[in-house]
Amino acid sequence: MNHLYIVHDGENKYVFRVYTHHWRTPLEIQEEVRLLNHLKGADRQIAFPIADQSNQFIQEIEAPEGTRFGVLFSYAKGIKTAKFSPETSFLIGQALAKVHQSTENIELMRMSYNAQNLLKNPVLRTKEFYHQNSSEIEFLESLSDFLTLKMENADQQHMRYGAVHLDVWFDNLHIGDEKEVTFFDFDFCGNGYLCYDISYFLFQLFTTHLNEEEYQVKADSFIKGYETITEITPEEKKLLPFACLAIMNYYISVQCDRFEYWTNIFLNEDHLKRMVGNLKRWIAYHKIELK
């Protein structure tokens, strides 16, 4: 979604993110920075923003396409890998729970991830991008209606709410020495149920593990790790199989929205079929009946 540069100062390295044109407003970036500084102050395992000599976090860059914004971040220790052990999955769960302890009841001046913004609006944008109905578009429309009812009927009193990452998976965390977990890329942070992050991680774990027994072992370990820090309520657990489907519906529409800026050569009907295929595999695994 953005352009990233590794920056060296001789001893250390950092990441300089340059947001694509017309992607995030200064206020949205300020709120991301505010959240990360809050998490850094709570000693959570995250890559944090670094201010310049004028104590400013956001840089303005005049590019040919217009003004773009940049932020320098600390470099997350360790490596990125999808092949982590169940023990590491346990530690990822613990680290995420600690982040959620610090983000619960935090409100950002950014998008609120509700049924309107995750389901109703996105499916219309996806349909408009592809210009014609297909079995995949019809499936997403039916799924959107089904999930809207699930989300609107959730018992909000028993759902933890606050600032969410919304993109927690192996591609946005580094693992050091099999035991040190650091999260980064809070570009999609916003307001929502904290269980969104749990559900999304499980979905991405599922898509990267074709061996479903191996997936279940790591998923169980992740949940156990999380609950050594804080409980996942029964109402949240009821929503876990469904929340990630809503998030993926949203991300499909984001890919469509950003097509011109992202230059997705793979964003075509076959890509949509693959995305929908992953959703259907998850639905089958959890024995979800779309009625």
Image (cartoon, helix red, strand yellow):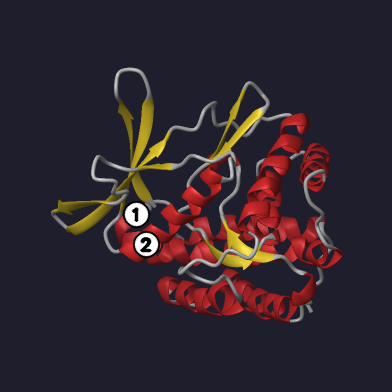
Residue at the top extreme of this rendering: 11
Can the viewer see residue 233? yes
- In the image, residue 189 sits, relative to residue 43, either above or below, namely below
Q: Secondary structure at mark 2?
A: loop
Amino acid identity at mark 2:
Arg
The spot of residue 119 in percent (x, y) is 58, 75
Mark 2 residue crowding within 10 angstroms, few (<14) / some (14–19) / many (20+) = some
Which mark is on residue 262?
A: 1
The residue positioned 76% from the left and 61% from the top of the image is 240
**Is residue 134 placed above or below 166 in the rendered structure?**
below
* Residue contact at pointers 2 and 1, CB within 8 angstroms: yes
Number of dots carrying numbers: 2
Left or right: residue 135 compared with residue 73: right
* Residue 134 in view here: no
Q: Which residue is mark 2?
A: 258
Vertical side of 27 occupied by 90: above or below:
above
Residue 83 placement: quadrant: top right
Which one is in front, 1 or 264? 1
Nearer to us in this view, 137 or 222: 222
Looking at the rendered structure, the kind of residue marked 1 is: Trp
Look at 69% across and 75% down and name the residue there. 147
Query: Image height check: is 127 above or below 45?
Result: below
Cα–Cα span, label 2 and label 1:
6 Å
